[in-house]
Image (cartoon, rainbow, N blue to C red):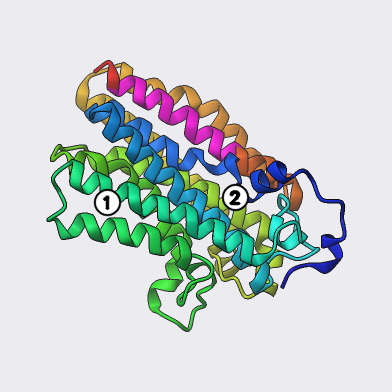
Amino acid sequence: MVNTKESKEKKPPTWQIWWTAARPHTLTASLCPCLVSYAACRPPWKLHIVWTVFCMTVQLGTNLHNDYADAVLGADTEERVGQARATAKGWLTPQQTLRASCTVLLGTFVAGVWLAFATEQSHNPMVWGLILTSVLNAFAYTGGPVPLGYIGLSHWSIAYSGLGDVFCMAYFGFVATLMMPFLLRMDLPWLYALQVGCLATNILVVNNLRDRFTDVKANKRTTAVRFGKFFSLYEYVLLLAITYGLVLLDAFQHRSMWRLLPCLTMPLAKKEIEAIWTKEGSLLNQHVGGAAKLQLAFCVLLAIGLHYT
């Protein structure tokens, strides 16, 4: 439920409230796959811009719906150590946040429909499936009929793997990176999508590490809640190891030094690993953003390497 104590705080300006609810610092997770996809297959600008809008509005709509759902389901309370949430603070009513989320995701659907017809893929059921599930998962993640962020061990066996992480990998990794070449009937190696997905998932891993103590009280069964701190720490390191291991594999296969450019981000990755192993609670706030900055830097360098080879 909405925290009435915090709702008494002085409200920031309206633009700042919506900025808080949108969580723009996380939008790199939807921008990065578009950068990599464009560098690899170089689609027409108009198509790529619309696809970028599709990806970023999916995440924006998810963020807004998460702001709404976590407030009404009780995950966001006065004990929260993460960044402020507009609905829980009482700055926005649940109805306002929900309407905003629905409006943004309607834009996502319209962009998806335009892409399906513009690429002459309107007859392809897989395209429609990806468009519809992208929109529906934005609702389902925390507040739908099967709220993925809150699934406990008793629902399905797949829940043991941590559905939030799985869906982040699938949609902000594989779908967001591979959808444009798929629409254009072009091939793009899966390893780039896996790299993007690993780095996007690590943003969620740090977020879940930070919030695990308040999440458990709200029965929000993230991987950090189910399996504990060290599971998430090792997951973070493993995802980075996969990411950089694939850089070396790709560079070896193509005999190209350009493909090694993402390795320049390894000092930043090392710094982030050291931080999450030694910090707790609100001290991890900057490292949620740190994981996003690492993904952005890596993907920019990856895109440059793909462009010049």
Query: For the residues carrying marks 1 and 2, which lies nearer the camera in this image?
Result: 1
User: Depth check: 81 or 120 in front?
Assistant: 120
What kind of element bears circle 1?
helix
Q: From the image, which quarter does the N terminus lie in?
A: bottom right
Crowding at label 2, few (<14), some or many (≥20) Cα neighbours within 10 Å? many
Residue type beneath disc 2: Val
Q: Is residue 57 above or below residue 145?
A: above
x and y percentages locating residue 271 in the rendered image = 61, 33
Q: From the image, which quarter does the C terminus lie in?
A: top left
Q: Residue furthest bottom?
A: 154
Q: Quadrant of residue 194?
A: top left
Q: Let me know if residue 304 is in the magenta part.
A: yes
x and y percentages locating residue 102 in the rendered image = 49, 60
Left-right relation of 92 to 142: right
Residue 113's tag is: 1
Residue 206's tag is: 2
Left-right relation of 143 to 76: left
x and y percentages locating residue 252 in the rendered image = 25, 25
Q: Which residues are magenta?
A: 290-306
Residue 273 seen: no
Q: Residue at x 33, y 38 (%)?
A: 50
